[in-house]
Amino acid sequence: MNHFCLLAGPDTYVSDDWDLLDDVEGRRYWLELFEKHFQETLAHAAEHYGKSAGNHIDSARVRFQETIEELRRQPNALPSGRLSVMELCRRREAALREHNLHDPFGHVKQRENDSAIRLYPAVTRKFHAMAPDARWLHLVESVFAGNIFDLGSSATMSTAEGSPDFLTAVENTKQRPWLIDDYDRLAEDLTQTVPAKWGKAVIFLDNAGCDFILGVMPLARELALAGVQVVLAANELPSLNDMTADETVEIIEQLTTVDPDLPALLDAQMFEVVSTGNDIPLIDLSEVSDELNAAAADADLVILEGMGRAVESNFSAEFLVDALHLALLKDPAVAKRVGGEVFDCICKYRPAS
């Protein structure tokens, strides 16, 4: 594991600069949120694993509650000297994995993937019918809409579980100007005539279901059709309802049966799936897999998608190449920190200097 090869300043890079030891109100908020969300996660684990996992679930509940109480009593006792949301994510996943609850949302991911695959042909046909300018904007709005379906956020967990209408969600996306709105500058590069501005793009994936299949994949395939090789970088291990590299490969294989363009793009090696080496919903770019770095070495565009990877972590990260952050804000504390509200949209585009 090493730093991401496209970071502009690896020596000064900080993945998550919100130190909860310096923010009493923020620490209280996040500890309560993780405490509540863990109970919801265990309810999904019970559904996914069945009665045979009852003892594991009870042990995980006790283990994580002890963690939360210890952080409340002695937050300054951490060896690292700081407490971040990323650290809380790591401790949550450790409590689950220590008790063999490796993928408590597995059944939900499968259900949402199946639902999204059924919608995929209609979504891509709609894009084909659009003029290029309208198509690129709609593709970005679809990424925002896909972000809504997230089981990692209490604000959107009920929405995700309700199998909502994705096409309606796209139409209901907040109108421009967005909270951070660099789309006009981005559009100049997206609509550049052939050949495309970029030779290769690395897209850091977020959630399964609508997020990946109806949000990211239409954008990725449009980039590929424009001549951009696309590296899809996904988690190594399951975490909440995030995509893993293995799941990404499986879904793309399924999509080839309903997308006549995709087999030719795969034959032309326009897509590559790699593991980031990551195992939580945020990502620390100082520790990524050699596989990712090998695939990204000649890339000239980085896309960070989703609130966890693009805002909660890496919001201030600087890259050697063009960088695009696309996210829907789903947590009130995160939204407040960047000067917005829940369901505000982030389209932050920073061309390389």
Image (cartoon, rainbow, N blue to C red):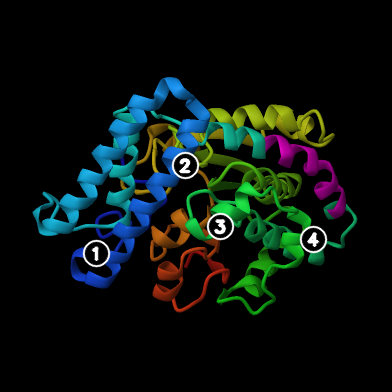
Q: What stretch is highlighted in magenta?
A: 113-126
Q: What residue type is labelled 2?
A: Leu
Question: Can you give x and y, in whole percent of width and height, for residue 137 in the image?
Answer: 73, 65
Question: Can you give x and y, in whole percent of width and height, for residue 310 in the image?
Answer: 47, 58
Q: In this view, does 73 lie to the left or right of 180?
A: left
Of the pair 173 and 137, the residue shown nearer to us = 173
Q: Dot 3 corresponds to which residue?
A: 156
Mark 1 / mark 4, whichever is N-terminal: 1
Mark 3 / mark 2, whichever is N-terminal: 3
Mark 1 / mark 3, whichever is N-terminal: 1
Classify residue 2 by image quadrant: top left
Packing grade of label 2 (10 A; few <14, some 14-19, many >=20) is: many
Classify residue 248 by image quadrant: top right
The mark found on residue 240 in the picture is 2
For mark 3, give the secondary structure: helix
The mark found on residue 6 in the picture is none
Q: Distance between the Cα atoms at labels 1 and 4? A: 41 Å
Q: What residue type is labelled 3?
A: Thr
Q: In this view, does 234 lie to the left or right of 77?
A: right
